[in-house]
Structures are given as C-alpha cells and as structure tokens.
Image: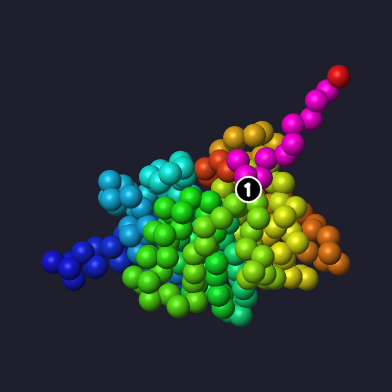
C-alpha cells in the first residue's frame, strides 16, 4: 500500500510539472526536478492532502492565518531567483517549509523564517523527515530576517506585501537577489513579482510577472496622511 501511495504521489508531481509548471515559463530543469521530487502533501494540512498538487493556494492552520503559494507561482519565483549550488538562501514567511525544501536541492543552504512558531516547528520536522541537512527553520519577526545567518545570496519572500523590505536588503550579499510579490495596496493578494538586485549597496528593482499569493502584513508601508 505504501509503495502504491508513493507511486501515485510521484505521478501527481509529474503531472503538476507538465501541466502547471512548464506552461508558466518555468524552463529551469533544476526547479522542475525539485518540484517532481519533493512531496508537497507532507507540508499541507491533512484536510487538504488531496489538493496538494492542484493549482490553488491552500490555507494552513497555525496561530496565524497563512496560505501556501500555488505551485506554479512558487516555481516561477524560484526560477527567477537564479539559485546556484553554493548560494545561501533565506525564505521569508516559510510556513511549513515547502519552499525551503525545494530550495535545499538547488542551493548550498537555506533558512526558513516564519513569525508563527507552530509553522516553524512543523517546517523543522518536515526537513528532518526528508533528511534535509542543509535546511533549518527559525521563528521570529519576518521583517527582521535572520541576521545571524546573513549575508544571503538570495532572499525569497513567499507572499504578497507592500514591499517595505529595507531590513532584508541589508542582509543581502553584494550581487544578491531578493524576490517577492509587491502590491501598492495593503492586504492585497495579487501583485507584481519583483526581483531586486543589490549592487554597490543599493537594491535595484526589476518587475517580472503578475502573481497572486497570501497577504503578508509584515512589510506594509507606513500610512501617509494627506492634509
């Protein structure tokens, strides 16, 4: 029975890559291979295990509300981050660890950060279950990043925010990349994926593609009063 479940899960991952990932301009073979290899069902709530390979965002239950980004959007973010085998990577709003588990097979090391300790603990347990020795999970404020593990070659912000990433930019190595989905509207679940490249201490943005994901309040811009 276990072998049948494994084969069925592998077949679903193959279908996900062929019908969702490849059709969204994810041509990176490494990203495709990771999406085929990492079992997404262990990262979702048990009630949604049957939807693990759908193209929908899935709600995660914890002390705070969080959504898993749809696989095709996450795969595209990973492709655009241009991860290399020796990169040190930070995944912000890492939730139960799926994005970081994918990164673990593409980069040298990865830190998954979440402000909900329930999610952070689940992520660490998932890394252990998969034998990922180059991935670790931390609990803490999202906008504070993970300074003890910095500098990072890449930072992936897994959600939609207003893009107030100032605290994270300082943890990027020279030539490092930060990618996230940015909207001008607070609490939005749709925006533009933007890649920031750190050059000479400055973060230069490049808009990439439209995308939807769960909203992140941690990177909201200060409210401006107009008189």
Viewer-closest of 66 and 26: 66
Magenta part of the chain: 217-226
> Mostly what secondary structure, the magenta segment?
loop
Viewer-closest of 46 and 192: 46
Residue 111 position in % (x across, y down): 55, 67
The residue where tag 1 is placed is 181
Disc 1, SS: strand
Viewer-closest of 78 and 132: 132
Whether residue 109 appears in this view of the structure is yes
User: Farthest residue in the top direction?
Assistant: 227
Viewer-closest of 45 and 39: 45
Q: Quarter holding the N terminus?
A: bottom left
The picture quadrant where one finds residue 33 is bottom left
| The stretch drawn in magenta includes residue 224 | yes
Residue 42 placement, left or right of 142: left
In this rendering, the count of numbered labels is 1
Residue 172 position in % (x across, y down): 72, 66
The picture quadrant where one finds residue 170 is bottom right
Residue shown at 60%/68% (left/top)?
A: 89
User: Farthest residue in the bottom direction?
Assistant: 86
User: Farthest residue in the left direction?
Assistant: 1
Residue 56 position in % (x across, y down): 42, 45
Residue shown at 67%/65% (left/top)?
A: 147
Q: Label 1 crowding class (10 Å Cα cut-off): few <14, some 14-19, many 20+?
A: many
| The stretch drawn in magenta includes residue 39 | no
Q: Quarter holding the C terminus?
A: top right
Residue 121 placement, left or right of 24: left
Whether residue 30 appears in this view of the structure is no
Report the colour scheme. Answer: rainbow
Residue shown at 84%/64% (left/top)?
A: 201
Q: Eyeballing the image, is 112 above or below 143?
A: below
Residue 79 position in % (x across, y down): 58, 64
């Amino acid at each position: 029975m276990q072998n049948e479940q494994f084969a069925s899960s592998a077949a679903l991952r193959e279908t996900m890559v062929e019908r969702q990932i490849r059709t969204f301009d994810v041509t990176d073979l490494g990203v495709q291979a990771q999406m085929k290899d990492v079992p997404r069902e262990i990262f979702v709530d048990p009630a949604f295990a049957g939807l693990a390979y759908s193209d929908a965002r899935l709600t995660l239950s914890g002390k705070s509300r969080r959504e898993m980004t749809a696989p095709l959007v996450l795969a595209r973010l990973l492709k655009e981050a241009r991860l290399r085998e020796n990169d040190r990577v930070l995944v912000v709003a890492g939730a139960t660890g799926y994005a970081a588990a994918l990164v673990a097979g593409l980069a040298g090391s990865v830190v998954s950060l979440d402000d909900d300790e329930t999610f952070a603990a689940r992520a660490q347990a998932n890394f252990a279950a998969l034998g990922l020795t180059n991935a670790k999970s931390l609990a803490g404020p999202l906008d504070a990043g993970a300074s003890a593990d910095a500098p990072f070659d890449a930072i992936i912000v897994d959600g939609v925010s207003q893009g107030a990433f100032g605290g994270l930019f300082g943890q990027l190595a020279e030539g490092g990349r930060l990618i996230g989905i940015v909207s001008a509207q607070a609490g939005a679940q749709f925006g533009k994926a933007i890649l920031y490249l750190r050059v000479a201490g400055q973060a230069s943005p490049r808009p990439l593609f439209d995308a939807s994901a769960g909203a992140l309040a941690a990177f909201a811009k200060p409210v401006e009063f107009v008189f």
